[in-house]
Image (tube, coloured by chain):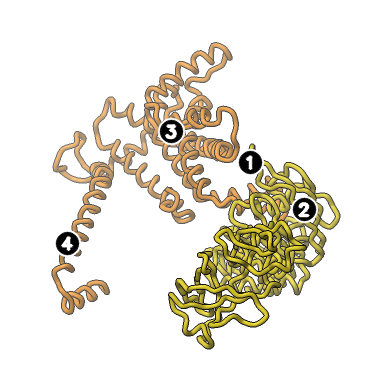
Amino acid sequence: MARVAIHNLRKQFGQTTAVADFSLDIADGEMVAFLGPSGCGKTTTLRMIAGFVEPSGGAILIGGKDVTHTPPNRRNTGMVFQRYALFPHMTVTQNVEFGLKMRKLPAAERDARIKQALDMVRLTSLRDRYPRQLSGGQQQRVAIARALAIRPEVFLLDEPLSNLDAKLRVEVREEIRALQQQLGLTTIFVTHDQEEALTIADRLAVMHDGRVQQIGSADELYERPANHFVADFLGKMNFFEGAFDCDGRFVTQRGTPIGIGALQAANPGTRVVGLRPERLSLDAAPLPDTNSLAVTVSSLVYMGATVEVRALTERGDPIVAHVQNNFRGDVGRLVAGSKAFASFRIDDCVLFN
Amino acid sequence: MASTVFDDKATATRTPAPRRRISASTLAARALVVVVYLFILSPLAFVVWLSFFKDVVITFPPSGYTAAWYVNAWRNAAFADGFIFSVKIALCAAVIGVSLGVAAALGIARYRFMGGSLVNMLLLSPLVVPGIVAGVAVYLFYLRAENVLNMDIVGTFSGLLLAHVCLTIPWTMRLVSAAMSGLDTTIEEAARNLGATGFQTFWRVTLPMLRPAIVASALFSFIISFENLELTLPLVGPGHTTLPIAIMQYLEFNLDPTIAAVSAVQIVLLGIVMLVTDRFVKLSQVI
């Protein structure tokens, strides 16, 4: 395995910039997820690392070696594609063997590696099947075995779970993570699914419009999003637009005061206050040692483990709270039209300029 | 049988009226299929039947049956020579035409270049130009070329082969382009990622995936070349006559069932070629 260093990587397609100024260092054995909506440049970046797209500028180093202009077959990356991309005219064994043959390994070594790779994904019993005789999950596991059999320096996964159904997605995801940790694989995982990225990766790079918005661990990104886009893309967040008034209170445009005056000195230019729905508590009376907003419930959305409560402040600012669905305490009595107090701690507020 | 049993039960337990209506429409559909097949197959069946008629002048109903016309066809050197010559031309045209057609289809599908669509149109044009027109045009062109190059072209094997190659290329291009548009290009990327060079990827991955289309192209090219009459007509010379032309020449002076016997043999041989091909590549999946 190897370190990967990406310096100021850039890709232009005619007038449009697909990727702008992408820089990232990935440690040996680290798993990084590129996360963003479709068209954000995450797949283009991955394809530049694999060598399928020629960068317009910048450099890619794998294991300290500059591979920016190296053709894909001489890069030693192992890639897994969204649509599996197995060779339809070859059996499972032949698929896994392909990369080993290209490397001109002796037959004994090839057999040993095939066995090892197929054991790893628990598909040894299906080794003589053709791809069309396998389920989606099995096909993707063959693709993983095929990519890992060549012992790549970097393991690249391009939306590998998108074609699988929900349950299988979690299963294969956990399998990929287990393999990655067990083998110490330097891995890049591209996805548009935030839950997938948050649960699988050591670090995430959130991308939007060809630019990296923020790079960090799951909790860093979730707790301290760098900007409005990251906060909105990862999970849900209430946004209150407004400004500090001359009395040092933060007041929304509609006039709801948010009690974060203590934070003004450090963040005088704040224009938006963000608050995660699950950090709000809804009660009949204001909780001690918190800030509280008097709200009127407008609707409840049943989501299983939680209930989403949509409400309005007295001045009409919409606010969303996620409360545990245990129907104990005050939540059980909430109906549309109920009056309640939404309480939160100052520490849970995220400020944006 | 099983379905009949099921139908009976269903009629007994459920409302019978809609059942009967569905079976009536199914019946109509089946009848239509039978009629269409009869329409397609009856000329072939008739040719085979005629080839056994006893009478020299085809009369109906025949006064008796004989296999003598097959012996007559066998003894006629023009048919045997024409058959061998046609097979030679068709085999060579299929091999060369398919190779060039695959290359052309790949080039046009994968690379953008100046005049790409013009090349595409030119290569497909033999499909739309009437064969006799193309034949005369090629003949006139060959005459000019003979004057310039000072060598024989009209009436030679190579001259005819070249024309037949042009005739077969569009079939390969159509079938291979269609197959290529259905190919997942990430499969080729996977091969590159695993260490294959561009050529290795083509040879070990792209080409095998196109195999059904290529086999079908070869079959079609062979048949198109083998049975071609109009384009071939102006281009053959003495001693270089294809089977269709031998048949036509025989027809000018004779009207006995020998022709039917020759056609029957041709039908059976081509049928065998198709069945054998179908064993290796399911033709219905390609066309």
Instruction: Residue type at mark 1: give it.
Output: Thr
> What shade does chain A have?
yellow
Amino acid beneath label 2: Ser
Q: Position of residue B27 (x, y in %)?
A: 19, 60
Q: Secondary structure at mark 1?
A: strand
Of residue A125 and residue A263, the one placed in the foreground of this image is: A263
Q: Residue furthest front?
A: A247
**Residue linked to disc 4:** B24
Task: Assign the N terminus of chain A to one quadrant of the image.
Answer: bottom right
Query: Is tag 4's residue or tag 3's residue first in the polypeptide sequence?
Result: 4
Q: CA distance from mark 1 to mark 3?
A: 65 Å
Tell me which residue sits at (66%, 71%) in the image.
Answer: A199
In the image, A294 versus A239, the foreground residue is A294
Q: Please, which chain is the residue tagged with disc 4 on?
A: B
Does dot 3 land on a helix, a strand or a loop? helix
Label 2: chain? A
Residue annotated with mark 1:
A16
Q: Which residue is mark 2?
A: A23
